[in-house]
């Protein structure tokens, strides 16, 4: 009995040694991995480049200044300014009036508290300077430096109000390609520029071309969508403030976007052209092309990328080599006119898109 007990203790001892050795090996392998992973998480974590208070000053303004109200700001230096007239005539200016029933927006909502900016400016001083043809300016350095803010901070000034109103598409702004490429609201909208803060849909093209130079060239090609003619706009297909679809499309897919204007291509058809069920870009260049109908290549070479060529017999039943070559190198749509889909079979009984 004592021998069995001794052997049992010996086995337990060896197992303990083996377990300790195993844990040592695991520790040597796992612990460095955990340290590396924690280091990666630290690197991935977002850290401010400036103290938090500096960011707050960018958005809120001087902490030692007080809000004095729009009337005091305007009477001090902008009473007769053209900016005020344009601002009053616009949507933002209408919200300066409490009786408008809209959320109150004033100058200090965007520019920050203005007590330090107008310090020492009085109505009498404004009148005296006006008589001398001298313009009285506030100390704009004491306000938020809107023009020199980083693009995300500029947009945040606007999003303070606009992400909470009925403009739901602005909720996608921070994930949009514009925001990620440091485009701000100020690049497209001029708050003091005119009574209407929105850009006219048919003027968006020229505005977008300021950044999208390659598209400007495409819309100048012989076959193009009529953007330059003012019949459509960039906003007809794209949601410039962001969205869930690729390329900021207004619809979930490319085809759904296209059939808004081309409903006859929607389908479904009994005989469908398989490659164009989801996208039209297999055959068409959406902005412009050197080929007719926005095709990415001329016929028949576009079709021959997927389909084998074939000859046709002459009207007399023969097979003239001259006429065969002419038929082979002519446009496929001369016979296959329903290339987007058809509900009728071809003469052979198959779906040849001929009628």
Image (tube, rainbow, N blue to C red):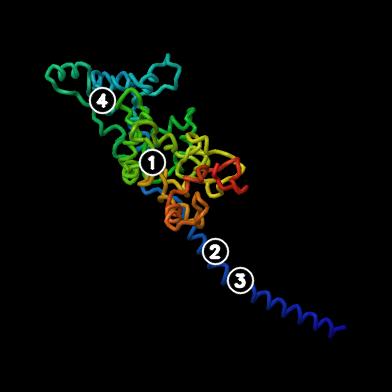
Q: Residues within 10 Å of mark 3 (few under 14, many from 20)?
A: few
Closer to the camera in the image, 248 or 351: 351
What is the secondary structure assignment of the residue under circle 3?
helix
What kind of element bears circle 2?
helix
| Residue at the image position 28 percent from the left and 19 percent from the top | 85
The residue under the point 34% across, 25% down is 107
Picture coordinates of residue 133, whole percent (x, y): 13, 20
> Which one is earlier in the sequence, the residue at label 2 or at label 4?
2
Q: Relative to the observer, which residue lies in front, 152 or 300?
A: 300
* Residue 138 location (% of width, % of height): 23, 27
Please report whichever mark, 4 or 3, sits nearer to the chain's N-terminal start.
Answer: 3
Question: In the rendered image, which residue does mark 1 sit on?
Answer: 152
Residue at 64% from the left image edge and 76% from the top image edge: 21
Residue farthest toward the left in the current orientation of the protein: 132
**Residue found farthest to the front:** 316
Q: Is residue 290 above or below residue 122?
A: below
Residue 6 left/right relative to 123: right
Label 1 vs 2, first from the N-terminus? 2
Residue that carries the numbered disc 3 in the rendered image: 26
- Residue corresponding to mark 4: 118
Number of marks in picture: 4
């Amino acid at each position: 009995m004592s021998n069995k007990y001794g052997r049992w203790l010996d086995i337990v001892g060896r197992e303990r040694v083996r377990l300790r050795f195993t844990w040592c090996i695991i520790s040597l392998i796992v612990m460095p991995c955990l340290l590396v992973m924690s280091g990666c998480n630290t690197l991935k974590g977002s850290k401010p480049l400036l103290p938090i208070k500096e960011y707050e000053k960018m958005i809120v303004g001087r902490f030692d200044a007080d809000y004095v109200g729009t009337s005091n700001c305007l009477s001090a230096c902008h009473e007769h300014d053209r900016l005020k007239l344009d601002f009053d005539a616009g949507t933002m200016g209408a919200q300066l009036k409490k009786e408008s029933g809209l959320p109150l927006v004033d100058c200090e909502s965007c520019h920050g508290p203005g007590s330090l900016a107008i310090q020492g400016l009085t109505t009498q001083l404004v009148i005296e300077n006006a008589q001398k043809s001298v313009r009285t300016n506030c100390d704009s350095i004491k306000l938020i430096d809107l023009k020199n803010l980083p693009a995300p901070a500029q947009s945040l000034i606007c999003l303070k109000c606009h992400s909470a109103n009925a403009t739901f598409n602005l909720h996608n702004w921070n994930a949009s390609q514009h925001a990620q490429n440091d485009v701000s609201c100020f690049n497209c909208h001029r708050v003091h520029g005119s009574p209407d803060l929105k850009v006219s849909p048919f003027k968006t093209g020229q505005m977008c071309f300021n950044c999208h130079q390659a598209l400007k060239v495409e819309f100048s090609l012989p076959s193009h969508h009529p953007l330059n003619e003012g019949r459509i706009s960039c906003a007809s297909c794209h949601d410039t403030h962001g969205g869930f679809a690729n390329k900021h499309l207004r619809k979930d897919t490319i085809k759904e976007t296209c059939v808004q204007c081309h409903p006859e291509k929607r389908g479904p058809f009994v005989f469908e052209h398989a490659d164009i069920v989801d996208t039209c870009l297999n055959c068409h260049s959406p902005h412009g092309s050197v080929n007719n109908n926005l095709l990415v290549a001329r016929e028949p070479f576009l079709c021959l990328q997927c389909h084998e060529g074939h000859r046709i017999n002459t009207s007399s039943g023969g097979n003239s080599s001259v006429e065969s070559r002419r038929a082979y190198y002519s446009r496929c749509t001369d016979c296959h006119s329903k290339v987007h889909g058809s509900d009728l079979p071809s003469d052979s009984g198959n779906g040849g898109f001929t009628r």
